[in-house]
Amino acid sequence: MPAKLITKSQTVAADIAALLRARNSALWIVTREEARAEGFLIEAAAAAGYITRTWDVASGACEIDGTEANLGLDPSELKDPGTMLGAIKDRAQNGKERCVWIMRDLPVWFEGMPGAATQRGLRNLARLLPGIPRESAQAVIILTPKGDVPAELADHATVVEWPMPDRNEIASILDTAVSAIADPEKREAAAPNGAREAAIDAAVGLTGEEAASCYAKSLVQFKKIDPVAVVQEKKRVIARERVLEWIDPLPGGLDAVGGLDVLKGWLVSRKLAYSAAARAYGLPMPKGALIGGIPGTGKSLTAKAIATAWEVPLLRLDMGALKSKFVGESEQNLRKVYKVIEAIGRCVVWIDEIEKALQGATSGSADGGVSSDALGSLLSWMQDRKSEAFVIATANDVESLPAELLRKGRFDEVWWVDLPNASERTEIVKASLKYNGRKPVGDYAAVVDATEGFTGSEIAALVPEAMFAAFADGQREIIEQDLLTVAKSVVPLSKTAAARIEKLRAWAKGKARPATTPETEGARKKMVRALDM
């Protein structure tokens, strides 16, 4: 039999057990999942030789089965946190059994002047407990969704952020949901091998309760586990956190992006790293790519297409929107973003126009160092992160990007997207016609020549403009002449910003990899002749 895989929660629980054995008397556990975390904490306490009891403001002191704990005091009195902390102190000093107290509602009693007594009570208790004989050792575990430890308790409480369920734990939740089906045949059909892996991937990033609820709902509605239904729950989670934007996928995926053959081929190869075979092989997870280039050349479109091609969520990170005038709040927002991304698991994170978000980080600004802090935070996260998120950053003003952002280890590759060549312009026209539901116009050679120097967005915009003309002319299909007429009215960016484009091209030499196979003049003539045939 294969060895049972250890989950992140089991690893943290083992660390908690070690802390309890080392006589750490106050642990501050940050989690929104009380029930799930408590299950692991009870096991950790048992492993360290403690029994476990719980406390909350509604029930007071309870045994782990929910019944009232007999501590020799009126149960109603024990609903007061100060009285409860006093009872723990008495039990420690009077040689009672070793006990871990999981306290659920304690942080709300630390607020304001009325909370000073409770805070002092816990602080005194934390100072006392390490010196109590081992046979009557007591420890307090504070369970809370907030990681803000009062300064008065910072030196006494060990803070532990409880992890979201990982793939192994999600797999166990899925198996539990499916095992509840009585009929063996229906149980087998509910989550066949391929669907099982997809359902696990879809649920990574949800809490244990959310994943279990999604699986149960899917079984009731569809008689099977539907990964699409689970992804919809993920979308709700992103909206709730309000630090990232869920972007709908681009229909057609990479096929909807004209040209960029080298970049697209590289992205297809990187998708293989997310397969089960790649995980077994030990293939490292791709970190991401930075795509720089001339505005309107398909950088943002490519970011949207990746998520479609890889069948993963696309999350847009607007770093500028996370900045705050309040000291420390911008950094807190970024930490929240990173935590959500880590929890979501496999996804594409799109940072659009990253140079604007980091403006002032290297040249100096009057934002009190917020931009510099954001750059440092981003660099550290990109270097050290272990998640399956693929970060795709796009930039127009590549010259202003800090050098430390471009080095290997932050991104797998830095790409340069230039104005489309002849073959790419052909692909862009075809893709735009297909996207707008139009038929091919036949010979593209004249359109290719007429759009030399156009950006991809300028070429793609020809089709809807031509549709207006064709609709006004008897609602007919567009023809090549419509595209040529519209093209004549366009003043391309290559003319209005020629000097700027040359500077960008000079920067790209030796710093970025071309996203397109260089096209020789001979190849261009050969392609045009083929189109004329």
Image (spheres, grey):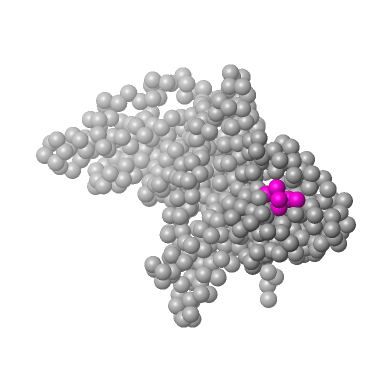
Is residue 83 located in the magenta-colored stretch of the structure?
A: yes
Position of the N terminus by quadrant? bottom right
Task: Indicate whether 5 appears above or below 518.
Answer: below
Report whether 357 appears left or right of 9: left
Q: Position of residue 112 (x, y in %)?
A: 63, 35
Task: Indicate whether 220 appears above or below 356.
Answer: below
Report whether 302 appears left or right of 375: left
Q: Residue at x 74, y 41 (%)?
A: 120
> In the depicted view, which residue is nearer to us: 335 or 406?
335
Report whether 16 appears left or right of 199: right
Q: Residue at x 26, y 25 (%)?
A: 489
Residue range (magenta) = 81-86
> In the depicted view, which residue is nearer to us: 325 or 359?
325
Q: Position of residue 269 (x, y in %)?
A: 54, 52
Q: Residue at x 71, y 50 (%)?
A: 83
Q: Position of residue 291 (x, y in %)?
A: 52, 37
Q: What secondary structure do most residues of the magenta stretch adopt?
A: helix
Q: Position of residue 77 (x, y in %)?
A: 66, 54
